[in-house]
Image (cartoon, rainbow, N blue to C red):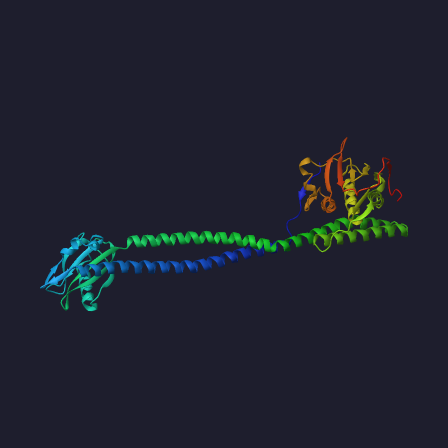
Amino acid sequence: MRRLRRAAPASPAVARLRRTRRLMTLLFAATTAACLLVLATIAVRIDAGSRSSGLDHEVSSRAAGLARSVWFDAGVLHLEPLEEDELAQGAQVLAVLQVGPGKAPLVRTAVPARSALPDGGELGRVWADVLAEQETVVFSADSRSGRQLRWAAAPVWDDDRIGAAVLVGTGLARSERDHALLVRWLALGCAALVCCAAAVGHLLSGRAMRPAVVALAQQEQFLAEAAHELRTPLTTLRLAVEAGSSPGEAVRLVDRLSRLVTGLLARARMEAGGQRPELLALRLDQLVETTVAELPDHDRVRVRTEPVVVLGDPDLLAQAVLNLVENAQRYGGPADSPVEVTVAPGLVTVRDHGPGVPVADRERVFSRGVTEGSLGTGTGLAIVRWVAELHGGSARLTDAPGGGLLAELRLPVRPGSPSSSSSHEGSGTVGA
């Protein structure tokens, strides 16, 4: 069985393009991450400021409203309205401070308990701030039980002096917990967006570089195919010159080289999209006979044809037939085993008597970049399929009856193509 192996790794140029793609993906992700970090920082600060402002507004509004619900009458502070006021019922911590005989204020009432209030020193400072500002004072302080609260102290006027202050407090834990939850969600969301941005950047950079990668691959493939196609005629020409063959033989080989170069250039232009195939009406049987006759060891090839006219490019079709025959000669068994070429309407078959190709590998050998055996470039059969598809046909490998491998090149037959039931067998060119 013929052994298959993959071609060499990607060229340095393709590797550089891939590294550039990875770098572009990294830069895209880093830029997105930096932008999201700035936006997240702004959002966190705005949220923190908004929560702080909202909390201050809540406690100051509640304290000011409760301060208006109590009053002094002849120096006596009336706190009865606090028992029914909805603002008082909704307060987490509520206290009333009244001017005392000393600097420290007296605590007239405390809800839920005095332990929920700041210590005496903090209450004295708050009382002094209220007297100094003569308006609602907002501050943060811990309760005696260690709970962190936000407070507001609103003055209660006794004629033209401040006689008391309503103190309202609310906990910071819930606001801080909600803020921390927002920060976590922002972090997770930014991380997910950076991953999505990296994936999108990788996809976009890949699509942007795909034409360049394809062009490089086509260029390298063309060079490999050119070397493959020119190796045999160049070797034959050298042997002919060294053996002192007739000038006519050398001219024939040079003509073959010229046709090969023309076909290679035409194929390169077609694959690059710069040229469309020029299909001409031609005798497929005569083209096959002429192509086989140019082989240095055409005596190993038996040709059987019948008249067939197809629309095709003569140089490309000759190249495809040449690749099929040379492939059969190279891998078709012992050196003296024959290769049989048959031309029928819309079909060229090449049979060898070698070990064949495993069924699982018969499609892979037509792929570019697959090396066949330990010799050759592995481009010959890929070119055959490319030429067949370019002409609206197909190429495949099957088992030959009685052993060996049968390669088929199918081409659409031109309507009204001449054909006859007669056939002939020989080697070399059978008259035009």
- Where residue 125 sits in the image (x, y, percent)? 19, 64
Quarter of the image with the C terminus is top right
Residue 159 vs 311, above or below: the answer is below
Judged left or right of residue 210, residue 335 is right
Residue 295 in view: no
Q: Which quarter of the figure has residue 168?
A: bottom left
Quick check: 281 above or below 76?
above
- Furthest-top residue in view? 402
* Observer-nearest of 65 and 3: 65
Q: Position of residue 258 (x, y in %)?
A: 81, 53
Residue 199, can we see it? yes
Q: Residue 107: percent from the left, percent from the top?
A: 14, 58
Q: How many marks?
A: 0
Rendered location of residue 425, percent (x, y): 86, 37
| Foreground pick, 262 / 352 | 262
The quadrant in which the N terminus is found is top right
Point out the residue furthest to the left here: 74
Rendered view: 118 above or below 323: below
| Lateral position of residue 3 relative to residue 429, left or right | left
Please name whichever residue, 266 or 234, is drawn nearer the observer in this view of the structure: 266
Q: Residue at x 90, y 52 (%)?
A: 247
